[in-house]
Image (cartoon, rainbow, N blue to C red):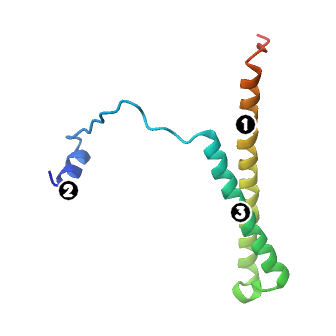
Amino acid sequence: MHPLIVAGLVAAGRLTIQSPSRIMPTTPSALHLDEISRKWRDLADRRLAYFTELYRSGRWKHYYIEESFALRMRDVIKAAKVWRELADRTLAARVLADDRTARGDRFRSAA
């Protein structure tokens, strides 16, 4: 069958695609998500360092007017803070989860 016909049948709901595998695709593990958030945090930190150096050297005047550079700098600082918090939060959540599994749920709730 031609690919455009198949796409049209799928879009119209007349064709269902069945997979021979009954296993759902795997989702990224927590370690993989931690790595992704650390990479984004590192990128945001490098960007912040670049803009800081641009400001200190005065080179920003060649590329920006004062208002647009101030807005851009605020965005860069905000992004760095957000990614730092996200990376720290995912690391803290993983450490807590590892700690709970290491304890083996020895502690019961008070209720």
User: Could you tell me if the residues under marks 1 and 3 are in contact, i.e. CB atoms within 8 Å?
Assistant: no
Q: Secondary structure at mark 3?
A: helix
Say which residue label 1 marks: 93
Q: Residue at x 77, y 13 (%)?
A: 108
User: In terms of depth relative to the viewer, which is nearer, 23 or 16?
Assistant: 23
Q: Secondary structure at mark 1?
A: helix
Identify the disc placed on residue 78. none
Q: Residue at x 64, y 42 (%)?
A: 31
Identify the disc placed on residue 4. 2
Say which residue label 3 marks: 44
Q: Residue at x 36, y 30 (%)?
A: 22
The x and y percentages for residue 60 are 76, 83
Q: CA distance from mark 2 to mark 3?
A: 42 Å
The x and y percentages for residue 6 are 20, 49
Labels in figure, total: 3
Q: Residue at the bottom extreme?
A: 62
Q: Residue 83's quadrant in the figure?
A: bottom right
The x and y percentages for residue 104 are 73, 19
